[in-house]
Amino acid sequence: MMRTRALSLLFLPFSLLVQAGSEKIDSPRDAFFGEALFYASQDEWFDAISRLDTELKLHHGVDEPQLDQLHYYVNDAEFSVGDFELSYRVHRQAGRAIKAVIEGNVEPEVRNEAIYRLAKIYFQKEQNLNAFHAIERVEGDLPEGLEDDLDYLKGQIYMVNGRFEAAEKIFKSLSGSDEYEGYAGFNQGLSQIAQGSVKAAGLTLDSVGRLNSDDRAVLAMKDRANLTLGSRLMDAGEPQAATQFLERVRLDGPYSNRALLGLGWASASFDDYEKALVPWTILSQRHVTDPAVQNALLGVPYAYGKLGLFGKAALGYGHALSMMNAELDRLDASIASIREGNFLEALVREEIKLDRNWVIKLRELPETPETYYLMDLMASHDFQSSLQNYFDLEQLRKKLERWVDDYAAFEDVIDLRRRYYEPLLPAIDEQFRKLDSLINLRLEQRDRIDRRLQAMLVAPRPDFLATSQERLMMRAIEAAESTDVARSEDGQRRINRLKGVLTWQWETEYHERLTTTFEHLIELDKDIARLNEIYNSFVRTRQAATQSYQGYDQQITHMRQKTERAQATVKTLMLRQGRMLEMMAIDELQKRSQQLEVAQVKARFALAESYDRATMKKSGISSEGMAQQDKPSSEPPTPDQRTPDQRSPGLQQEDAVQPDAAQSDADKLNKPQPDSAKPAAAEVESPITEPPLVEPTQAAAAERGVL
């Protein structure tokens, strides 16, 4: 059957959608499958799904699928549809596609890979019990290269289901894996903590913190392990022991700010304020939007005050106040900018997203101050999911607008064809009718000759095979019989002799002539077959000419109506999704503003008290008198004396780093990671009850996204 792919793709509804990447298939013979893979490689999941889903439907609809080029890759194509749907976050359809493979008559390797993907879908949707039941169905041979991935996913699923001992064994077995270097060890440490094996967990995390690697993602994981150990020791009241781990954290890593803040408070905890000034001073010179930097701005003058340098302390508090005032003004401007809609406009700028670090570029734009403070928010899982939904809606909006324009273009093309063909077709049809009648006449003549020849095989008729000249001669002889010549005996004898010559010639040459006639008939049949081909070709061309402009009006009208309804739906959803993103951003900025206002009040009191102390010291008041005055006075306000990791008696729940992509922070902010089961690390978390999982994605993302 003819496969009108172009028309099927042209009028494909926008809602026809059927996370993970595409299968790597070398040089697919089916061009449409290759096209879908190309779009998938560009992260154009909608186009990839629509094209491959259409191709699969056409393949299953042909009379002989084994002759179709997609037949060689149909299993890979079915898998790829599920992968594309997973990447497009259409989990329900992806799950159905993969379940169909599992329940089909396939090899164990194919079924186990499908089970792995189904379990991954459940895990990403936080359906932990379903993920556990799915992963337990794996049995038999595994596809090459899937062993470590399957074990790592199984360890994650075991952890979220409370099977920490089994998870620990799995992660321990992965300690030698190059792909999961550092991540398996960190998760092993978390599973040991969940079992109460604090000492063993410390040794495991210490080994992760000593890894030697050139991989920036692994180095980020190494920093996180050291920061976690240092934080736990600070919580346990062992600042001296915590120092060695905090000092391992790189100065240019994603966790350096919190490590520097923690180092300062570790030194301050045993009254070594001179040593505390070193990390705090370095930290105070970094980007002021980081809460750790804001804490350091107050920590530096606080240390100077403890060292009796009240003048420097006053100057430090004054500098902190000026920085905070500037930040509050920027926050107010950011909130106003978001309410004006600049935030959403900046997020969908195509030229910004051409850069893999588009979020970092975005925060540097002067007209988008709101993105300046939202790095942590924009790195969170919830915000990323909402943001990606908004991106998808924006993409659909643009596609729908383009489709509306395409409908008008299609109508122009159809009208052009109509105006071209309609004047020509009547004259062509008239000529065709004349030729058709002649063709029918010749076909009837051929059939009559064939019938006579078949009859001559039974009852020979040599006279039927006479040549035209012989027929004329016979007619002349028959005419002579009616003349006076035939009345004489000599004349009649001569006429009979002439008849005998012709009859003799017919009889003796009959078989040869019959054979030659059949050969000519066969040649005639070839010409007739060619004539039929030309005839059918003309009929098809004639029909194609008519069909090229007839019958589309109703389809285009129907599709335009569906597209317009879809545009209204997308517009409504975009308004809702955009409003939700704006509220999340405004709420985050307002929290930042409130924190700065509290710190500002503390800094003002500390500034006043530092001036008083400096004045009294200059006036010669004794240290005893100063101490006496200090009794009713409170200590100079200080920032939170612990890093965010130190505020929790256990590890943070957000210590989990997802495993699928050692990508940049910008990559993570462009779209949620398919294998991410937990959001990126937050700054403040409550004690965990179920230890989180650690995967390569977020560690690598934080590593590459640090400014």
Image (cartoon, rainbow, N blue to C red):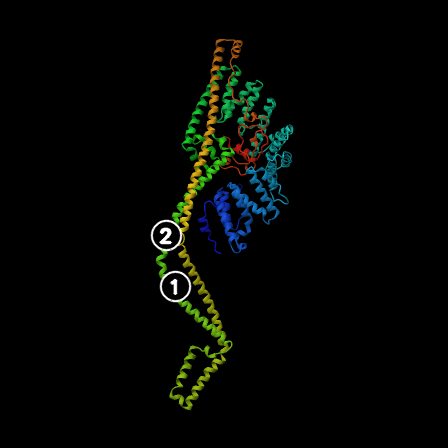
Q: Is there any visible trace of residue 642 in the rendered image?
A: yes
- Which residue matches tag 1? 432
Depicted 493 relative to depicted 146: above or below: below
Crowd around label 2: few <14 · some 14–19 · many ≥20 (10 Å)? some
Residue 616 against residue 459 in the figure, above or below? above
Left or right relative to 19: residue 337: left
Give amino acid for label 2.
Asp
Q: Which residue is mark 2?
A: 415
Residue 262 drawn at (x, y percent): 55, 24
Residue 22 makes an appearance in the image? no
Q: Percent from the top left, x then y, of residue 528?
A: 45, 67
- As helix, strand or loop, the secondary structure at mark 1 comes to helix
Q: Nearer the viewer, residue 504 or 548?
A: 548
Residue at 40%, 90% (x, y): give it: 487
**Would you call the spot at circle 1 few (<14 residues within 10 Å), some (14-19), or many (20 or more)?**
some
Seen as rendered, the residue at the extreme bottom is: 489
Q: Position of residue 182 (x, y in %)?
A: 60, 33
Check contact, mark 1 vs mark 2: CB within 8 A: no
Q: Nearer the viewer, residue 37 or 389?
A: 389
Residue at image location 42% in from the left, 69% down from the top:
442
Q: Helix or strand or loop: what does disc 2 sit on?
A: helix
Among the 4 quarters of the image, the one containing residue 209: top right
Which residue is rendered at x = 48% and y = 15% of the image?
Answer: 609
Q: How many marks?
A: 2
Q: Is residue 77 left or right of residue 371?
A: right
Between discs 1 and 2, the one toward the N terminus: 2
Q: Position of residue 30 (x, y in %)?
A: 51, 51
Marks 1 and 2 sit apart, C-alpha to C-alpha, by 25 Å
Above/below status of 585 relative to 625: below
Q: Which residue type carries mark 1?
A: Phe
Residue 186 tag number: none
